[in-house]
Image: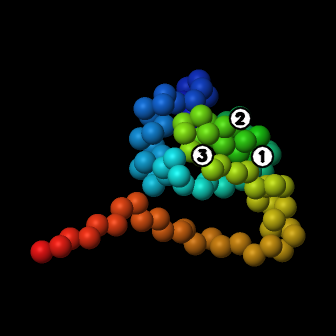
Amino acid sequence: MESTETWNRRSPKELKAVFEAHGITADTTVIMYGKFMSPDNNDPFPGSAAGDIGAIRCAFIMLYAGVKDVRVLNGGFQLWVDAGILLSLLRSLKFLHVYSFCP
């Protein structure tokens, strides 16, 4: 969603291409969460450790790009794990198009 050189958001055209490649449309519900807050400035992508702030920034970029239902997990991922809330690590499948062919 961001340029690795400037950390500015990508152009609307670039965002659209990335989201579509991941099956995200304007009508997709997206849940963002932060994982931790211990950045390593030697990491090529130190922003990946931005925790909830990074999740919120990504959520705003997705809303800007036209995704209508973007949510941020309250408390971040670790709070949910610590609270014993059941989580699924399985990737959910999304069918973008269903085609019916008639002879």
- Give the mark nearest the N terminus, 2 or 3: 2
Q: Amino acid at mark 3?
A: Lys
Q: Secondary structure at mark 2?
A: loop
Residue 94 as seen in the image, left or right of residue 48: left
Residue position for label 2 = 41
Is there any visible trace of residue 100 in the rendered image?
A: yes
Residue at 54% from the left image edge and 54% from the top image edge: 28
Q: Secondary structure at mark 1?
A: helix
Residue position for label 3 = 68
- Give the mark nearest the N terminus, 1 or 2: 2
Residue 88, image x, y percentages: 65, 73
Determine contact: label 2, label 3, CB under 8 Å: no
Q: Is residue 91 above or below residue 63?
A: below
Residue 70 as seen in the image, left or right of residue 27: right
Q: Quadrant of residue 14?
A: top left
Q: Amino acid at mark 2?
A: Asn
Residue lying furthest front: 102
Using the numbered discs, state the Cα–Cα distance from disc 1 to disc 2 in whole angstroms.
18 Å
Residue 63, image x, y percentages: 61, 39
Residue position for label 1 = 52
Residue at 77% from the left image edge and 46% from the top image edge: 52
Q: Amino acid at mark 1?
A: Asp
Residue 19 as seen in the image, left or right of residue 55: left
Residue at 17% from the left image edge and 73% from the top image edge: 102
Viewer-side label of 1, 2:
1
Is there any visible trace of residue 49 in the rendered image?
A: no
